[in-house]
Amino acid sequence: MIQSPEYITVLQPYVPGKPIEELERELGISNSIKLASNENPLGPSPEAVKAIKDSFADLNRYPDGAGYYLKNALSQMLSVSPDELILGNGSNELLDIAARTYLQAGDEAVMASPSFVVYGMAVQSVGGRSVQVPLKDYRHDLEAMAAAITPRTKMVFIANPNNPTGTINTKDEFDAFMEKTTDNMLVVVDEAYYEYVSAPDYADSMKQFSAGRNILILRTFSKIYGLAGLRIGYGIAKKEILTDMNRLREPFNTNSLAQKAALAALRDKAHVSNSRKINAEGKEYLYQQLTSLGISYVPTEANFIFIPIKDSIAINNGLMKKGVIIRPMGPMAIRVTIGLPEENRRFIEALKEVITS
């Protein structure tokens, strides 16, 4: 019988947030809301939707494998060369390509814990070893991560803001960490929630890129741009790094609708601005309500809030019965996406009922 390597057979698949349809089918309820997957509650830009509709007649054609127009728009926005950009089927695909490009069996990759689970999965899928460094005060402990680097370290993953805690690392912390990296390793900085950050001391990854560092900066159209269903993201890195990654990138890895929607979404600055505003207002409302309930939370720079709380599994189950889907983070915490005002109010009312029942 054909047998896969042990590091594949023990790999645990990613479990996404429960879809609304599945919850309602299981419990026989309706009018549910989903605050589990950090999606933009406003949906996509109307301009992106129009671009999709205008492209329906061309679906018999393969997409632009190079993503010429989208990469050129990103190039102008970011002041980088198109050769320093790579498009992915979501930034998830780029994580996987980076691991397959730069890791061999037995190589090490340093990452924080808890952080985005896909990092460890990408490393394990090529037979690498994840070196997990605990968070400190819910933030990446970059000093400890630097100390964890060994001659076998070939990659480091940094989520900034971090998922699931929503915390960031500062410019000084990040710059000091980069000074401790070596020339034979790649630092992957996942900035999926970059557009939500308002902190003035947020780490400047582009500064390190401009300095010629071995850095891969990942961003996505799944979050603030509201295109999670189309799966498109991008990476920024030196041309030499992306030349290697493009050897493994599948042809036509981003579809034509995703490319055109992303291009339109980039132009709709009003939609991005409104998404930030709705998120900031929702965040303050949830902070106030959680404080009034005596529930602690981790201040966030993203579009979700990490809430350390006992009996999180029971709380999650109780919320689902009331048609509110959040994300349990083990037995001692939950993560809730910041939604529209009515969704935030519904979450708080359901939470009140669950914790007092």
Image (cartoon, rainbow, N blue to C red):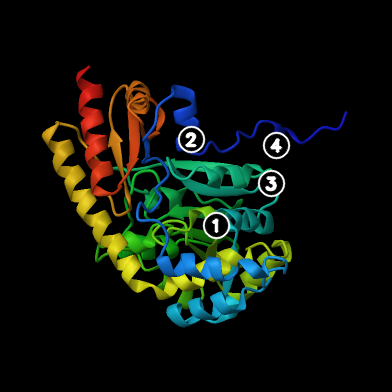
Q: Point out the frontmost of discs 3 and 1.
A: 1
Q: Name the residue beneath numbered marker 4.
A: 8
Which image quarter: residue 127? top right
Q: What amino acid is labelled 4 in the image?
A: Ile
Q: Name the residue beneath numbered marker 1.
A: 230
Q: Considering only order in the chain, which callout, 4 or 3, is on the residue closer to the N terminus?
A: 4
Front residue of 197/22: it is 22
Q: What amino acid is labelled 1 in the image?
A: Leu
Q: Name the residue beneath numbered marker 3.
A: 126
Q: Considering only order in the chain, which callout, 2 or 3, is on the residue closer to the N terminus?
A: 2
Q: What amino acid is labelled 3 in the image?
A: Val
Q: What amino acid is labelled 2 in the image?
A: Glu
Distance in Å between CA atoms under marks 3 and 2:
34 Å
Q: Considering only order in the chain, which callout, 1 or 3, is on the residue closer to the N terminus?
A: 3
- Mark count: 4
Q: From what the image shows, is residue 21 above or below residue 92?
A: above
Distance in Å between CA atoms under marks 1 and 4:
28 Å
Q: Quadrant of the C terminus?
A: top left
Q: Name the residue beneath numbered marker 2.
A: 21
Residue 236 visible at all = no
